[in-house]
Image (spheres, grey):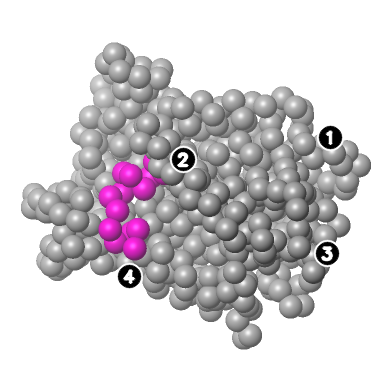
């Protein structure tokens, strides 16, 4: 039994065509773009932008977004080729299985838990922060012990400081609600996601248009604050560190690829969904962060989990403040929906391959969704959302995402050498330049993240290796066909 054995392309394509007893094909190209936008515009824009500006890049956080987008563009072109070749649920996990073998596929599948499950938990924590702001406007206040984790310090808008609650109950509530919606069905989830995407894109555009005339250009001086002598604290290294922080915001097009087996025309729809969502969101991100740092001095966003609301407050449009918060809540909801869906599809595929117990690939007789996987992640993600501080979660998600992108870029080069004649509806241009550039930029952004993020990644991966050799290797359908 070889841990490097690859899964034949013919087998993968055969699985993709088994739609009668598998996942239902209901997603159009437009729905796939909306799925990507749904995952991209959220916590990265409405929360992490302020943190990246205050701690790393200053007003040059706009350059951080451009740098992160360039790295994503290279990785996105590689994803698009794979998604058009192998329209199977599982994203980078499936692509790695076809190119680098079972062990690397397991590593990337385990890594995607960091990306999607902890990503949903991160957004859940931020969602609860904005919910508290909304409730405060109606003079509704939840018990302090039930709105933040035991290791977190929370400052409410009225100045109240809560240090160490019991659990973040609102975050657990929203994760549970969305997991139950995903059990109901992909089409229903996609319809709700499309509505939420329209709402939050409208709010981003309103923020840019109304905020533009209130920009104070003195807030842009200096545009790139001088480095403090510490790597990542302003200057050019700060722009790179800022890019690593906001990279969390760009994982949406990756989530599109997990839905390949539910796309109506994956060969055409996947490249459109992946690259279309990336282009739309990069443009909105740069304009949004430019306006935000023009409204309020960047250093005032330090420790602020709701910088968009803080910045918009200076415009004087008080009547829109509540609407802004409602729309941000809608935006966060669609992000969690896409991430929870992506995670369940990765585990569904790993279970179908025998690397995880059959429990994870059981399809609901009526709804045709991997309902037991959704229930498992309802519990798993809720625990993280309710008990872990948001900053720790955000960095773990970014490093996990970057590692996934690196492996996909490597995979495209391997596939071109191993299967040069395999049909590709979309071909990554300028190979090997594009994948190599993607690898270099993603590694550079990983390097810019805190040492604690690397330590957690190593511990998480070591745990994954133990599980693979204790269960996955012995039960792999590829290595144990009988």
Label 4 crowd bin: few (<14), some (14–19), many (20+), radius 10 Å? some
The quadrant of the picture occupied by the C terminus is bottom right
Asked whether the residues under the numbered discs 2 and 1 touch, taking CB atoms below 8 Å apart as contact, a structural biologist would say no
Looking at the picture, does residue 396 appear above or below residue 383?
Answer: above
Residue 417 — which label? 1
Residue 234 — which label? none
Residue under label 2: 458
Q: In terms of sequence position, does the residue under pointer 1 or pointer 3 come before the other?
A: 3
Residue under label 4: 173
How far is disc 2 from disc 4 in space, using C-alphas? 31 Å
Q: Magenta segment range?
A: 383-396
Q: In terms of sequence position, does the residue under pointer 2 or pointer 4 come before the other?
A: 4
Considering every residue shown, the one lying at the far bottom of the view is: 366
Residue under label 3: 14
Viewer-nearest of labels 4 and 1?
A: 1
Viewer-nearest of labels 2 and 1?
A: 2
Residue 249 x %, y %: 46, 44
């Amino acid at each position: 039994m070889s841990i490097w054995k690859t899964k034949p392309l013919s087998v993968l394509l055969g699985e993709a065509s088994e739609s009668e007893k598998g996942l239902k094909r209901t997603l159009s190209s437009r729905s796939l773009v909306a799925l990507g936008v749904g995952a991209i515009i959220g916590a990265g824009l409405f929360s992490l932008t302020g943190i990246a500006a205050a701690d790393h890049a200053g007003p040059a956080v706009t350059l951080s977004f451009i740098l992160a987008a360039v790295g994503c563009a290279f990785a996105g072109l590689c994803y698009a080729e794979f998604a058009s070749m192998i329209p199977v649920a599982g994203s980078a996990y499936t692509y790695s299985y076809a190119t680098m073998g079972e062990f690397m596929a397991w590593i990337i599948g385990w890594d995607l838990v960091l990306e999607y499950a902890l990503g949903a938990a991160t957004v859940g924590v931020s969602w609860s922060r904005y919910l508290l702001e909304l409730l405060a406007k109606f003079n509704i206040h939840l018990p302090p012990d039930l709105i933040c984790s035991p290791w977190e310090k929370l400052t409410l808008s009225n100045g109240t400081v809560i240090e160490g609650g019991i659990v973040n109950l609102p975050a657990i509530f929203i994760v549970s609600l969305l997991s139950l919606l995903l059990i109901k069905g992909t089409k229903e989830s996609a319809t709700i996601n499309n509505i939420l995407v329209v709402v939050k894109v409208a709010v981003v555009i309103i923020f840019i248009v109304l905020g533009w005339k209130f920009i104070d250009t003195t807030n842009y001086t200096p545009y790139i604050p001088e480095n403090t002598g510490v790597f990542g604290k302003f200057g050019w290294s700060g722009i790179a560190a800022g890019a690593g922080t906001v990279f969390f915001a760009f994982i949406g097009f990756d989530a599109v690829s997990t839905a390949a087996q539910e796309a109506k025309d994956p060969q055409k729809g996947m490249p459109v969904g992946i690259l279309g969502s990336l282009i739309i969101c990069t443009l909105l991100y740069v304009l949004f962060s430019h306006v935000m740092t023009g409204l309020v001095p960047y250093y005032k966003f330090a420790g602020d989990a709701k910088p968009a609301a803080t910045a918009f407050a200076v415009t004087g449009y008080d009547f829109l403040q509540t609407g802004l918060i409602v729309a941000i809540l809608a935006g966060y909801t669609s992000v969690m929906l896409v991430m929870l869906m992506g995670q369940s599809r990765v585990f569904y595929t790993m279970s179908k391959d025998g690397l995880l117990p059959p429990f994870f690939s059981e399809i609901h007789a009526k709804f045709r969704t991997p309902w037991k996987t959704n229930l498992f992640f309802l519990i798993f993600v809720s625990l993280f959302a309710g008990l872990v501080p948001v900053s720790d979660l955000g960095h773990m998600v970014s490093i996990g995402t970057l590692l996934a992108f690196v492996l996909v870029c490597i995979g495209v080069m391997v596939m071109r050498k191993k299967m040069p004649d395999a049909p590709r509806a979309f071909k990554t241009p300028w190979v090997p330049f594009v994948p190599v550039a993607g690898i270099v930029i993603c590694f550079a952004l990983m390097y810019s993240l805190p040492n604690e993020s690397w330590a957690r990644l190593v511990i998480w991966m070591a745990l994954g290796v133990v599980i693979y050799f204790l269960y996955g290797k012995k039960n792999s359908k590829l290595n144990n066909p009988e």
